Image (cartoon, helix red, strand yellow):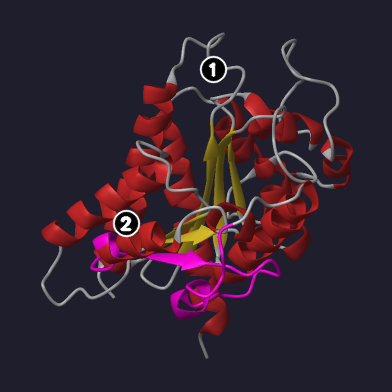
Amino acid sequence: MSYQEVLGQKTIAISISESPDMPVLGLGDEHLQDAMAEMARHLLALGARLIYGGDLRQYGFTNLLFELVARHRRDADEDDSRTGVTNYLAWPVHIQQPVAALETQIVEVEDSAEIVCLRIDGGRLPIEERRGLPSQVPTEQEWADGLTSMRITMMSDSDARVVVGGRVEGYKGAMPGIAEEVLISLKAGKPVFLIGGFGGCTCDIAETMGLIKPRTTSIPTWAGRTEFAGFTVANLNNGLTDEENATLAYTPHVDQAITLILRGMMQLVKTEGSEGAP
């Protein structure tokens, strides 16, 4: 295996969204997009496949990932036939959209990426079946059920999760989206990387787990926050030391965060290799 393919067998879930702390930290949406682009670029360059649960909004993170993987494929060998990113559309997200618009988006990215519609229980819904379903406005319960199911599916399909930012108010579902994604991964024992430099839900989780000291801007309570008190840094299971995880949870430097993520992933690959050796 070449150095460029060291993560060739790994699928990494990306959890990222705006944080209420960003203005206080002097950060804007462009900084968050730049951070995601740099992380995705490095992971793709090492052969990783990325998965994301987005909504296909114009100029959103999903389209940014599609652009990155398309560029990566142009720069890669002609024999590289991998789909670099898969975007999962939860039931309440895609059921509102006209099927013709979905099909257009699927065709536009099919050479380098994959868009997957999910049933409300998280199972894959072929586009042929989706054609027979009328568009509708989902109920609040359908939002909660559909989003939770999508996050469970993403966890099952991934080897690790990278987490950045996150709203803790104005969300749909049982709890803030990033919180639920992290909680599902922790309960399953999947590696989790908490990048706290953008504040928000990710930083709150790191505080609750005891990785870093509480901030004055931290919101004491939001739905599900207390559940993280039952986990420690050891539950992150990400190949990093306690000190490295603490650094990852507070560093404002994207380059440093990326270095730590890659270090952890490579340590996991090395450990798996040694365990599999005769």
Amino acid on which the number 2 mark rests in the picture: Leu
From this viewpoint, which residue is outermost toward the bottom?
Answer: 278
In percent of width and height, residue 224 lies at 84, 40
N-term mark: 2 or 1: 1
Quadrant of res 157: bottom right
Which residue lies at the image location 64% right of the left edge and 26% below the top edge?
A: 200
Rendered view: 224 above or below 276: above
Which residue lies at the image location 63% right of the left edge and 67% below the top edge?
A: 153
119 left or right of 131? right
State the SS at label 2. Answer: helix
220 left or right of 233? right
Mark 1 neighbour density, 10 Å: few (under 14) some (14–19) many (20 or more)? some
In percent of width and height, residue 269 lies at 48, 67
What mark, if any, has residue 44 been given in the picture?
Answer: 2
Q: Which residues are magenta?
A: 108-135
Is disc 2 in contact with disc 1, using a CB cutoff of under 8 Å? no
In percent of width and height, residue 166 lies at 61, 33
Which residue lies at the image location 47% right of the left edge and 73% below the top edge?
A: 131
Mark 2 neighbour density, 10 Å: few (under 14) some (14–19) many (20 or more)? many
Quadrant of res 1: bottom left
Rendered view: 136 above or below 64: below
Residue closest to the eye, 124 or 176: 124
Mostly what secondary structure, the magenta segment?
A: loop
In percent of width and height, residue 274 lies at 52, 76
What mark, if any, has residue 22 been given in the picture?
Answer: 1
Residue closest to the eye, 75 or 4: 75
Residues under labels 2 and 1: Cα distance? 26 Å
Q: Is residue 84 visible?
A: no
Amino acid on which the number 1 mark rests in the picture: Met
